[in-house]
Image (spheres, rainbow, N blue to C red):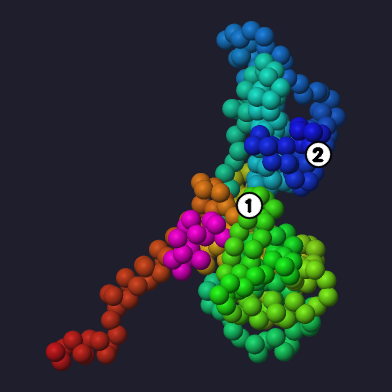
Amino acid sequence: MNNGQRRTATGKKINKKTIVFYECVLKLLQEYEHQKETSIGFRLLPRQSIRINTIEKKYWQKFYHLFSAFLYSKGYADGYVGSIWKSIKTLVRWIIKEKALPIVPAYHWFAITPTQNNPVILSITKLQFLITDESYSNELTPNLICVKDIFVAGCTLGLRFSDLLALKKNNLITEEGQLFIILYTIKTGSYTKIPVPDYLSTIFNTYRKNKGKFLLPQYSNSRFNILIKRLGEKIGWTELLPKYMSYKSKWIEQKKSLNKSWQYYDHLSSHTMRRTAITTLLILGVPEHVVRKVSGHAPGSKEFYKYVLIAQDFLNKEVQQAHKKLLQPDNASVNDTKNT
């Protein structure tokens, strides 16, 4: 706490979404206590002993298994259960470090099941289609055209959805004939200068003529996610792409209504834009420190490292395909070799 504001250990203000999630965790703990007719509490340990530590360890290990079973009984997937345990571990660390209370470091016994998500990232071919192919735009409603333009901007700039929609007309500047975006990223608290390509300049110039201070049309995150799926379906990205979730370390396919598997467009969301932009820049050979500057990630960011792995996996597959082609020369090449 600082001047009445809830802050992290680094001094940054805790955002509202995090506070809401903490409140959800508190309600789950209270529901668990009511259901089990028990109470969860930390014992103050002014003195350490092997016997007391053993008792505390057994208590918290039992709580971990019982509370995990309670969460799974509600149908929560491994990812959500893991997020809840991360919040509880944060609470324990806060009690020990910030409040300096002598309690056992129970977070050592709260294991988090690792999950591996394979988020949808637009291929370079799909991104090129959105940027260059105007034929499909004639069949789109004005609303979907706006969503398409926002999506192209997001897949190019790599900004968070909140930062992208917060762009104002005065965020655009021109230096030596090149258009740039200057902005203050909300999450990292730093200024970023991003060059704007010609195709994006055309989009921005279209909306700069509109009234209001914002550069792009305004949508809520939930509304945008609905419309971007509608856009994907409209332009034919309907190939099957099942969605899986990890539940008790087992992968289970999630179904849509009428027991149908997910299609490609079902995976599209505001997060797809940022993932696509960062991964595309890395695939095209832009140095990591430059991409981090554009995306607003800090050095050593675990989140950014995920993008590096995705880009490297793509490059590995491309190299493997190239090696296979070396072993399968076409007939023309074989004939040319024989004639020389």
Give the residue number, with chain letter if any, for mark 1.
190
Spatial separation of the CA atoms under disc 1 and disc 2: 29 Å
Tell me whether circle 1 and circle 2 mark residues in contact (CB < 8 Å): no
Is residue 20 inside the magenta stretch? no
Q: Earlier in the sequence, mark 1 or mark 2?
A: 2
Three-letter amino acid code at the position of disc 2:
Glu
Is residue 286 inside the magenta stretch? yes
Give the residue number, with chain letter if any, for mark 2.
23
Dominant secondary structure of the magenta stretch?
helix
Location of the C terminus by quadrant is bottom left
Q: Position of residue 70 (x, y in %)?
A: 75, 36
Q: 10 Å neighbourhood of mark 2: few (<14), some, or many (≥20)?
A: few
In this rendering, the answer to whether 171 lies above or below 21 is below
**Segment tinted magenta in the rendering:** 281-294
Foreground residue among 13 and 30: 13
Quadrant in which residue 93 is drawn: top right
Tell me if 315 is positioned left or right of 187 in this view: left
Quadrant in which residue 206 is drawn: bottom right
Q: Where is residue 63 in the image (x, y as percent from the top left)?
A: 70, 27
Q: Position of residue 177 (x, y in %)?
A: 57, 77
Q: 10 Å neighbourhood of mark 1: few (<14), some, or many (≥20)?
A: few
Outermost residue to the front: 176
Instruction: Give the structural element (helix, strand or loop) at label 2.
Output: helix
